[in-house]
Amino acid sequence: MSLNNKIDFAIIFKVKNANPNGDPLNGNRPRVDYANYGEVSDVCLKRKIRDRLQESGSAIFVQSDEKKTDGMTSLSRRAESVLGELLTRKDEAAKKACEIWFDVRSFGQVFAFKGKKASSKKKEGTTEDTKDANGVSIAIRGPVSIQSAFSRAPVDIVSTQITKSVNSEDTKDGGKSSDTMGMKHRIDNATYLTFGAMNPQLAERTGFSDGDAEAIKGILPKLFEGDASSARPEGSMKIEKVIWWKHNSKLGQYSSARVHETLKVNEDGTYQLNTLEGLTPEEIAGF
């Protein structure tokens, strides 16, 4: 049975001496908006949700390179290996994909792959690849959405020059290779807030269930566990609170915007939470 109640949720988290989401178009500096408020993109947050779900045993379609479990080198190969000829039948393929992959029935997915190379033929002395005209284009809209997270105050970015001083390659004269210079960036302290929602109407199409909602609820308090890297050392990313609003119907008693207005988060991570009539939030401490 699909999701029975509309759900809104919020995540409050802190960053300490870390780069929560580097911007590759800006030298991998932490993302900021034009007012210098820190930002963690929705894509980044979905990646972490997928990783935690995969670690808990759920089947995930969009797997990160370092967490691949099936050896597939691309999304198209993964889709073809599991769905096979079903990809030519959109409705059946969409239904099967939602049944198999947790992230597909949660966030949705666009299966858009070119047709395979069918053969080569001679054309005026040249070889030309011909392609199967039957490419794949299947769009699935998921019931779970999440916004980008923004800091509660403008952030200060600390940039440090670093030197890679190791002999990484042999030189012609047998000496030491040149040192490599680079930059490392971090945010000293900041509190971030993001909101998400689960839509029962869209859940009916993908089969996203109450159990699936509970699974996501269970991993949100430990979203950054097992996610350490040089940019985000262990313990530098901390979930403070997950706020969970479960409405009493599929349509919900209130709009998501009205629900968001009841939560005010301060720069130091403290917050004030008002209660709307008939809608009591659940406050869950970080792991």
Image (tube, rainbow, N blue to C red):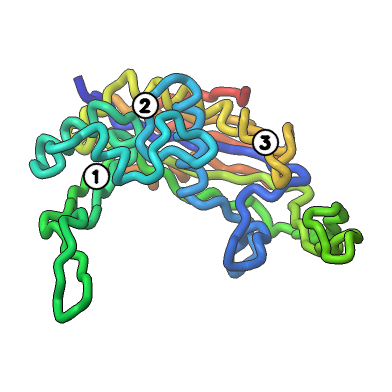
Q: Secondary structure at mark 3?
A: loop
Crowding at dot 2, Cα within 10 Å, few <14 / some 14-19 / many 20+, comes out as: some
Label placed on residue 59: 2
Seen from the viewer's position, the closer of residues 11 and 206 is 206
Q: Secondary structure at mark 1?
A: strand
Label placed on residue 141: 1
Which quadrant is home to the N terminus?
A: top left
How far apart in space, not on screen, are marks 3 and 2 (Cα)? 22 Å
Task: Specify whether 277 is left or right of 267.
Answer: left
Task: Specify whether 149 is left or right of 240.
Answer: left
Residue type indicated by callout 3: Ala
**Outermost residue toward the right?**
175
Give the residue at x 85% y 54%.
Answer: 167
Q: Is residue 138 above or below residue 204?
A: below
Of labels 3 and 2, earlier in sequence is 2
Q: Is residue 155 above or below residue 211?
A: below
Of labels 1 and 3, earlier in sequence is 1
Q: Position of residue 270 (x, y in %)?
A: 67, 37
How far apart in space, not on screen, are marks 1 and 3 (Cα)? 31 Å
Task: Specify whether 78 is left or right of 178.
Answer: left
Q: Position of residue 47 (x, y in %)?
A: 48, 41
Q: Which residue is labeled 3 in the image?
A: 228
Which quadrant is home to the C terminus?
A: top right
How far apart in space, not on screen, are marks 1 and 2 (Cα)? 18 Å
